[in-house]
Amino acid sequence: MDQTSRIFPVLPLRLRVTRPQPCAYLAGQQEQRLAGDISARPEEHDSLAEAGFRRVENWVYKPACLQCQACQPIRVVASDFTLSRNHKRVLSQNTDLIRTINGGSLTLEHYDIFQRYLGQRHEDGQMASMSFDEFSAMITNSPIQTSLYEYRRANGQLVACVLTDLQRDGLSAVYSFFDTRPDMAKRSFGTFIILDLIRLSQKLELPYLYLGYYVEQSPKMAYKGRFNPCQLFKNGKWETASS
């Protein structure tokens, strides 16, 4: 007789280690992840996020690379955040944008911006060949409270989106994509989205904005350290990062 259910009234979340594959951020490195399906255990999400895990669809994951610990979970202390001169400039360049929550209907308008963004910023990444159905699943398949925030100009033109999770201690920027055409470059959409989510976190009286993983050696990821004060998850606890 299987006594497992008697020993553990609630079974521990099953985690597995993924196969090695080329790292998307550091050349010559292999990455592995510790991952688990929380579709039946959504209440586990926030504790895992606070321990450095990230979510994609119904999975949570965390780097588990044997030879490298470059990826460090990072979160902005939104409650103590103050704008720099550059931040104020970015906000002033985007005062015409209107943030709304997508009602659940994804269109080719969203997919087109997503594809152009990948082609410009991550053409060699794992997501570059995603179909519309796969893109839709990434956005809509979530076991927790998740919103797709859209940013549009006054004429209704969609220019940026960010998929955002609501946690008990903050917001989590899961994935953002935006218009990368040359005439939009001066708007610094990546920076603007983070600043806007910080403002939203403050409005909701949530102390943190989670930004995923910080990789100091990677230009694609190092920018996250420019939002201070911020904290990195090291040795099992969150520590204030040196600015």
Image: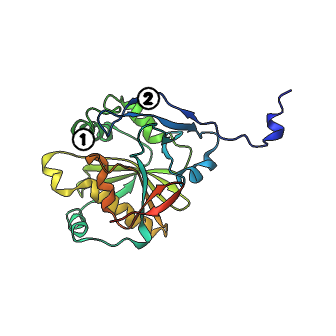
Helix, strand or loop at label 2? It is: loop
Q: Residues within 10 Å of mark 2 (few under 14, many from 20)?
A: some
Report the amino acid beneath label 2. Answer: Pro
- Which residue is drawn at the image coordinates 38% and 61% (left, top)? 197
Marks 1,2: beta carbons within 8 A: no
On screen, residue 92 above or below 175: below
What residue did someone put label 2 on? Answer: 20
- Which residue is drawn at the image coordinates 28% and 36% (left, top)? 115
Q: Is residue 156 left or right of residue 150?
A: left
Badge count = 2
Report the amino acid beneath label 1. Answer: Arg
> Whole-percent x and y of residue 79?
44, 71
> Whole-percent x and y of residue 36?
57, 37
> Whole-percent x and y of residue 217?
29, 47
On screen, residue 45 above or below 33: below
Helix, strand or loop at label 1? It is: helix
- Which residue is drawn at the image coordinates 31% and 39% (left, top)? 26
When asked about the image quadrant of residue 124, the answer is top left
Q: Which mark is residue 121?
A: 1
**Residues at marks 1 and 2, CA–CA distance in whole angstroms:** 23 Å
- Which residue is drawn at the image coordinates 27% and 60% (left, top)? 97
> Whole-percent x and y of residue 17?
53, 33
On screen, residue 241 above or below 138: below
Q: Which mark is residue 143?
A: none
Q: Which sits in the foreground, 107 or 131? A: 131
The N terminus lies in quadrant: top right
